[in-house]
Amino acid sequence: MTLDMRGINPAPVTPFTRDGAVDVEAIHRLGGYLGSLPYVKSLIVLGHAGEGTFLTQAEQVQVIEEFVASTDGRVPVIAGITGEGTAVAVEESRRAVAAGAAAGLIYPSHGWLRFGFQKGAPQDRYKAIYEEAGLPSILFQYPDVTKASYDLETQLEIAGQEGVFATKNGVRNMKRWDTEIPILRETYPDLQILSCHDEYLLHTAFDVDGFLVGYGNMASELLNELLEAGKAQDYAAAKAVHTKLFPLTQAVYHRGSHMEGTVALKEALVARGILEHATVRSPLLPLAEGAHEEIAAALAFAGLGQAVVPA
């Protein structure tokens, strides 16, 4: 059965204890909170926001299992698949299936970021993961500035493969977005189109079925309003939400490095009373002094106070 991701799909952070271990209690608190929101369709773990590549294989399995347990299995958990080689990614996918993952968000082989990919190689990666591990897949489109961003032909071929039911598009080139998304939609009407443009959500809200974003950790309420306005083609309503969120977007995603967004997300979760502290794992580092207060002020401007976390 194809997963329905037509809504908000947060990419949860991975909470750590103060001494750096995976914090199971905090996972249950975060997953329980996100899973209690009626418009949240899935939780996507082990991605960039979740520091997935900083975890051991055993920890990756643990994170999947505990997020599944955090909602008693009510909300599908999707695992980021990041292994470098195809055989490695297949093994990672098998572990994810065994841990309870309902699907995989398939990252490009990271060597492609620097060197590019051979024609047909991405298609083989998706094919092997589905056929050998039985893991349904989401096509992940990387930013245009990387050499791992798929051309339209590659996207269409992957989207047409068995087991691929959605695309998470983060091309971050609005010319390509406006050109390619309508072609994907026309060619595959059942393919779910998901934006992961945390910092460009207003532009992309009018063309998508859902948001798959780290932003969903801290502001799913307003993201749902933005998505609904986009689906209704109501620009004025969407712009109003965007205006409320823009200081938060700046405080979290307009930092020196996009990777700092993960640290900032944890600070926002502390400010909302969901996490107790914002511990991250190296090579991430704490934010500069004053960042927590800046993020808390932006949350207040957006009207996002203390979250109601299920007991």
Image (tube, helix red, strand yellow):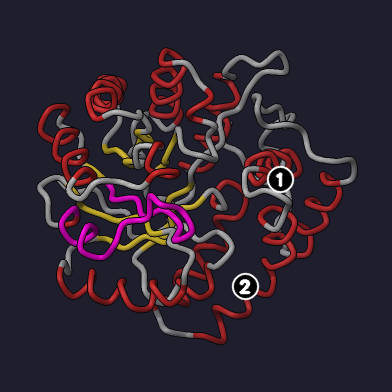
Question: In the rendering, at what x and y percent does residue 113 appear?
Answer: 43, 44
The residue located at (17%, 64%) in the rendering is: 190
Q: Does the segment drawn in magenta span residue 203?
A: no
Query: Residue 215's spot in the image, x, y percent?
Result: 57, 53
- Few, some or many residues within 10 Å of mark 1 (<14, 14–19, 20+): many
Image position, residue 134 (x, y; %): 15, 31
Left or right for 245, reference 79: right
The single residue placed furthest to the right in the displayed view is 289
Is 103 positioned to the left or the right of 190 in the image?
right
Residue 185, position as x, y percentages in the image = 23, 71
- Determine the secondary structure under disc 1: helix
Please state which amino acid type lies under the numbered disc 2.
His
In depth, the one of 107 and 304 nearer the eye is 107
Q: Secondary structure at mark 2?
A: helix
Residue on which disc 1 sits: 268
- Nearest the camera: 298 or 39? 298
Please tell me which residue lies in front, 246 or 130.
Answer: 130
Residue type at the position of mark 1: Ala
Q: Is residue 285 left or right of residue 50?
A: right
Residue under the point 45% across and 23% down: 63
Q: Which residue is mark 2?
A: 242
Query: How many angstroms separate mark 2 from mark 1 (CA)?
Result: 18 Å
Q: Is residue 240 above or below residue 5?
A: below
**19 left or right, relative to 195:** right
Q: Which residues are magenta?
A: 138-158
